[in-house]
Amino acid sequence: MIFSINQDVLLDTLNVVQRGLPVKTPLPILNGIKLEVFEDKLIFTTSNTDIAIQTVVEDESLEVTSPGRVVIPGKYLIDIVRKIASSRIELTLIENKILVIKADRSEFKLHVMEVEDYPDVDFLDSVAPLTLDAKTLKAIIKETNYATSVYEKRPILTGVNFKHEDEKLYCVATDSYRLSQKVIELSSEVDPFNIVIPNRSLDELSRILDSLNEDVQVFINPNKVLFKFRNIMYQTRLLDGVYPDTLRIIPTEFPIVIKFNKEELLKSVERVSLLSPRDKENNYNIIKLNVRPDYIVEISSTNNEIGDALEEIIPTDDVVGPMIKIAFSSKYLTEALKAFTSNEITLNFAGEIKPFVIKGDLDPDMLHLILPVRIE
Amino acid sequence: MIFSINQDVLLDTLNVVQRGLPVKTPLPILNGIKLEVFEDKLIFTTSNTDIAIQTVVEDESLEVTSPGRVVIPGKYLIDIVRKIASSRIELTLIENKILVIKADRSEFKLHVMEVEDYPDVDFLDSVAPLTLDAKTLKAIIKETNYATSVYEKRPILTGVNFKHEDEKLYCVATDSYRLSQKVIELSSEVDPFNIVIPNRSLDELSRILDSLNEDVQVFINPNKVLFKFRNIMYQTRLLDGVYPDTLRIIPTEFPIVIKFNKEELLKSVERVSLLSPRDKENNYNIIKLNVRPDYIVEISSTNNEIGDALEEIIPTDDVVGPMIKIAFSSKYLTEALKAFTSNEITLNFAGEIKPFVIKGDLDPDMLHLILPVRIE
């Protein structure tokens, strides 16, 4: 196996497939990147218990002298290619044991792993795919993934629910204290599905999609989902179990609606949180929101040890409905606000002990819900 | 106690005195910032077991309604002032118990600490000072402090030695494996001294000096040294004990001298270090340097588990002296190289098992020494 290629092309590919390397694994071979060299292309594969990634490189800078297959210690290969100053890199496999990496006046010799030991990875792209553009997919992940649970107590909640029915794609995440929902219109002919994708798999996918702006084909399989775009195949396992029916916990009638400038509300909440006491159960800061008779909104916190904080905010529109006093986690509100692109957002209250809903003028397909906590 | 002041002035001052707050302390009062309000100025004081800081604020934005004294929980005060959006802040002390911080539509009430409990701090500025400009002082810290020991085995080595004799200031740091020395000409009339300043105190001082470009007065006292500049007094304890006489371990004859482009050498060393094995004792990567008969220099590493790395570098000038093969910690060489401003540096070898010395064309007052390790 001998080939040479431009350093930047190789590095771009390695930056993608490295996301498939395990953090820790009982199977050392998975710390390697599988490389298959053909006359006209390279195929890189990585996999761990959650995800598998494959990229095909057919760059014009590629010059293959002889084909071959090898598994290369992933971390070291990436470190080396990243640090190389030369624009051109040559890789040569000697006796299936040593990979020689040459670039300008640098020469590295890496002990390689046994290619026959690398497990087979099937990328399942035979079903009819759903097509989403990368921008929409990134938006879904950004706007839902943070609301998934970090605790493994209810594993199903550590993923985002993607449900396709009635020509709509419902994307929902909840940790049972707050919820985020994005609904996309789908004109696709794809069969209905109801799957849950692990939050870490979506994080990694989002990073790979980062600078992309093209169509992504999504292949839904019984236990796996495959995202195919550009020269990349990204496959993740799905979470087992039934996702809770969240639609029925979202209130539909809101007697009190208050409109805010998002940045102003965000800054006030952040300041008040500086002194707010921590909730015992989940360690989040609890703050209070109070609509005064003069329709100025007070955000406040009380901490017996440290002191008190109070902010006044003038809503950007007339307040609809009666007075209200409600307490909740400031972390939930700040995270929700940051997910909105709108500058103007509304808080929609169904009652002092009922979940409240955040909506944004420019985000009609999005809805965030937060459960209040009882005060006193 | 009532006064108001511009937010940026208050924040600048807090950013300085916060460096005197303890990370951990058995004395809770030290978590507070002592504030004394006079008719025409504010005095802020912080202190911990190592350092004490005092700043005097006489800004024209200061408006004092009534004087007073208070100790305010430091972390909370800084967090609040940092987050405030208003340009103007008003502080009012109520019944010596509650500090009210008002800014625009924000209001914070902090429980304060007992001002009588705050320990007295003497800032010792009665001896004749030495004067250094801030730029030189920052350079001394940058070029020596990293070479101090991080282990407490020999506490005296965790500081930088400042020795004044024969109209020269010798600044030396060593962890007994490498050494950095900077020598400054002093025309000052100050008496000879020989002190050791803790590395952490120098780190904090360096951060405060960051954007300054003025003279710093240095008051050397028996157990303390005080740095006085602008409106700031920064005092640190000294380390007890006798600093080793390092001058005698620095070789003076160098049969082999090799000149390099600093960046080229640095990048090569960084690449070779990617595969280099770790030294058991201190966990640093060991690399080899070898001058070939054709006067090309090889930097290399051998790692039985991972593989080998080899770099060739062409010296930027004729190599003087015989061949040499020497091994050392790559961390020591990269840290030393980064301390130089020169683009051209020389490695000066006294022999394969003797310390070697690094010098820079543009850094005539600086010298770095590294102890080699034995190979095979």
Image: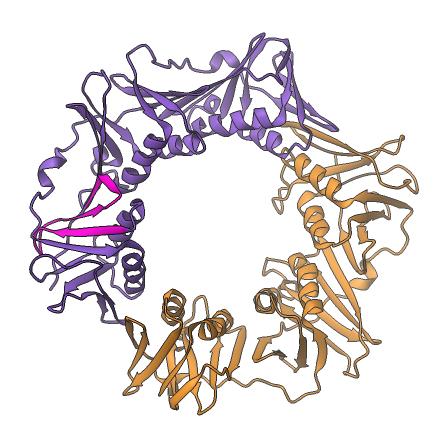
Chain colours: A orange, B purple
Figure quadrant of residue A141: bottom right
Residue A98 on image: x %, y %: 28, 81
Q: Nearer the viewer, residue B277 or A3?
A: A3
Figure quadrant of residue B50: top left
Of the 4 image quadrants, the one containing the C terminus of chain A is top right
Residue B193 on image: x %, y %: 20, 21
Look at the image and say whether residue B85 sits in the magenta stretch.
Answer: no
Q: Which portion, as a residue range, is magenta? A: B344-368
Left/right placement of residue A144 relative to residue A94 reads right
Vertical arrangement, residue B96 with respect to residue B259, above or below: above
Of the 4 image quadrants, the one containing the N terminus of chain A is bottom left
Vertical arrangement, residue A369 with respect to residue B158, above or below: below
Residue A100 on image: x %, y %: 30, 78
Q: Nearer the viewer, residue B281 or B27?
A: B281
Figure quadrant of residue A339: bottom right
Residue A369 on image: x %, y %: 77, 53
Q: Nearer the viewer, residue A339 or B267?
A: B267
Left/right placement of residue B322 relative to residue A179 reads left
Q: Residue at x 73, y 43 (%)?
A: A263
The answer to whether residue A28 shows anywhere in this view is no
The answer to whether residue A341 shows anywhere in this view is yes
